[in-house]
Structures are given as structure tokens and as C-alpha cells.
Amino acid sequence: MKVFGSSGVRGVVGETITPAFVGRVAKAAGSTWGTGAVAVARDTRRTGGMLADAVAAGLAATGSDVRRLGVVPTPGAQAYAERSGEPVVMVTASHNPPEYNGVKLIGADGVELSRDTLKRVEDRLLAERFDTVPWDETGERRRVDSARREYVDGLLDAVDRDALAEADLTVALDPGHGAGALTSPRFFRELGCAVRTVNAQPDGYFPGRDPEPVAENLDDLGELVRATDADLGVAHDGDADRAIFYDETGSYIEGDATLAALADAALDPGDTTVSAVNVSQRLVDVAERTGATLELTPIGSTNIITRIRELTAEGERVPVAGEGNGGVLFPGYRLARDGAYTAAKFLDLLTDQNASEAVADYAGYANVRENVGYGTDAEREAMLAAAEEYAAAAEATPTTIDGYRLDYGDAWVLARPSGTEPVVRVYAEAGERDRAEALATAFRDALVEAKTEA
Ligand code: MG
């Protein structure tokens, strides 16, 4: 697809993302969905109101009645769609910096649009094939103020409140000025947790930290955990579909360790779990140990969701899936990432142990990542041909759905062209740093040699 990537469409406001552009996206989506009601929600970005207005106008022009939900986390918008049977246009740029914004399309089932449906919307957008209606059939607009409240109520219904209330936990929360600031504090409080917050006022300038929940942005959260003696630190991205955790000592917990711990708790023998080709050895080991099947997809949650849909249709049980970036799915709850729900599932693990104990079994892996840049298409092609050859010759199990991943049983290496930069990325992971480095270096050397000869 040309316009829509794996998470809808995103960019810098005023450059690629303008009111006129998102209005056209809304017209294409409204035309594809047909008339009926469509909701519009947004995260806290400075430009969210402006772009949501343009989206609402585009939808009304195609005859859709518009429900304005205001600021809602993406999982809250998905909960609204599932409850009401109305699709949602979500104005968000997720974890991107403040100057970004974008649009994500959610179907009437609460799940982000499948690639097929998104492709139909994109075809209409590119051809400007909009089913606009005469003046007396344009959509009506109405405000709906209950989406956040109902989202939190739905979360509370979906978790084991009694066990958590009994555990008497303190949660340090950093919603990063994003949409989760309006829902997660209340959710954790109503779960019976004491809640301490930082960066918890919604603010589209993101003064306290950037929306991406990575360790370098989260020093305040570590501090807050230590200062308040909290049991767990929780950070969201801008639209709160992801959760990253800090343990009771105020130390960052790697997303891969979190995913492994959550999967270990959820998987039974015979189950299937789904992750992307850069999946950590920790999840590989958990699947192996529990007798579950691990399926890998190209990187990106849309690919994971598509695969879960297929597996579920085939009768497989997929209780948990996701990536090591804090984006975890519990398809039995909803086929969507949800930062608050993921945090509640992690809190479930803390009723009889500390957070550091909950992830101790999944520590002790070394990750290495290297980039090999290229200047010409010929160099890129030569490197990819070398990667294919290297994979064929290696005494390892290859996976070639997105780059070349080689599994050695105890360790793995992956070479994959970046989608956004002129580099081929080499990732490796092993129990010992030496082994991870050796795997990455050997693969990298093969690429560099091919590039030099090209
Ligand atoms: Mg997000």
C-alpha cells in the first residue's frame, strides 16, 4: 500500500498531514463503510481537535452521522466501536513526537481494519472516488461523552478485581501527557490500587517527556517508583495502547521480558502465540517450555492481528500475542493492544511476588543490533542476495517472511532491510553476549563483503 502503513497514516502536521488530507481519508473511509454512524476520537496532540474537525466534515459529506468522542485512548475507541457497532476514525500518532499526527481506522468490530479493507479505502483515496451526498443527506453531528467512562467500566469487568484489591498494590503511572492520562489513573484506582502519577495532565506539547515509552524518556517514572515505594511503574505511549513497566526498585523492565512473563502465565499446551520475526528468545523459550506453538509474522501489529484472525478461524486458541515494545494482545479480551489491560494482567502476576521476581526467569539475554548502510539499489540487492545465501548455508532454522531470521535453538540472528532508512539491520540475541555478537558479526561481515563487491 502506498498511503497506509502498518498503523494507518502518520506524518508531520502541515507537511503530509493536513486538514484537507485527513478530510479526504475520512471521505474515502465513509464511502467504503457506507452511510450510518461513524465515531471520531483523538489523542491529546495539539493538532488533534483541528484534524478531528476535518475528519468529521469529511464523514458528514459522505452521509455518515458523526459521533464526537473527544480524547480517548485508541483501545477506548476500539471498545466504543465494539460496543456500538460503529466504526471509528482515530486521530493519533501513537508514540511519535508532538509535531506528528495521523489517522487510524477501526472497524465496527473494534479491530483495526484488515489490510484488504484498508486497501479498498486507499484505492478510493488515490482515485478520489468519494460517495458524497446531496446537502439534505449530509450527516448529523453529535457529541458522545461516555466513551472514556464506558471504556474503564469495560476494563474493570474484564479483570479479576477482587484478587488485585486484596494485594493492596501501589502503581506509579506515567501516561506521558497522552490519552491514557484521562482513563488509566481512574482504572487503577478503581482496581483498588494506590496511584501516584507523573506527566499525568493531558498536554499536546508533551512538556514532561516525548510520547514514546522507551527507557531514555522514563527517568521520572523510575524516580517516582523509588520515591513512593511503588510496586510497579507503568508508562503508556500517546494513545495508550502500549504499556512499559518498571520494577519495585525503579528499574526498567525490558518489553521482551514482560511479554515472556505474560505469555508464560497465559499459555497452555497446544495453544498458539503470535509475534514478529524479531521476537525475543525469551518468548521462543516460553513457547517451547509450555508446549505452545509460536508463529512469526512480519514486524508490525497489523500483521500479528491478521495472523491471529486466521488462526482463530482455523480453531486455534491464541490467548496472548504481541511484540517486545509493550504492545501486547489478549485476543480473548479484544483483538487489540490495550496498555491499561496489559498493565492489569501484569499486576495479576504481582499478587504474591515482586515485579523483579515476576520477570527474573526472563532476564539474562543479550541483544545486539547493527546497521549496514547502503548507497545504491545495487548494493542493497547484493546484500539481500548475500543474506539469502548466508541463510541457506547456515545450520539453523530459517524464517524468511520479513528479512532472514536464523534460529539456532539457543540463539538467533536476523537481517532485514529497514522500511524507513537505507540500512539493513542485523539483530541477534543469545544467553551470552559473546555468542550474540559472534552471530551478528558473522552475518554482518557477509553483507559487507557482498556490498563491497557490488
Ligand atoms: Mg500507540
Image (tube, rainbow, N blue to C red):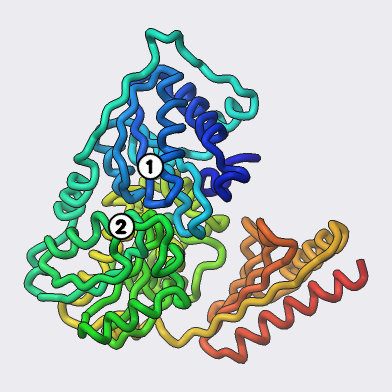
Left/right placement of residue 36 relative to residue 168 reads right
Position of 155 relative to 119 (above/below): below
Q: Return the x and y of residue 360 as percentages of the image width and height.
A: 34, 85
Residue named by callout 2: 180
Count the labels in the image: 2
Position of 60 relative to 79 (above/below): above
The answer to whether one can see residue 125 in this image is: yes
Q: Return the x and y of residue 189 as percentages of the image width and height.
A: 14, 64
Element type where label 1 sits in the image: loop
Image quadrant of ligand 1?
A: bottom left
Residue at image point 59% right, 76% down: 412
Element type where label 2 sits in the image: helix
Residue named by callout 1: 111
Q: Return the x and y of residue 65 as percentages of the image width and height.
A: 33, 22
Question: From the Cβ of disc 1, is ligand 1 less than 8 Å away?
Answer: no
Left/right placement of residue 295 relative to residue 69 reads right
Quadrant containing the N terminus is top right
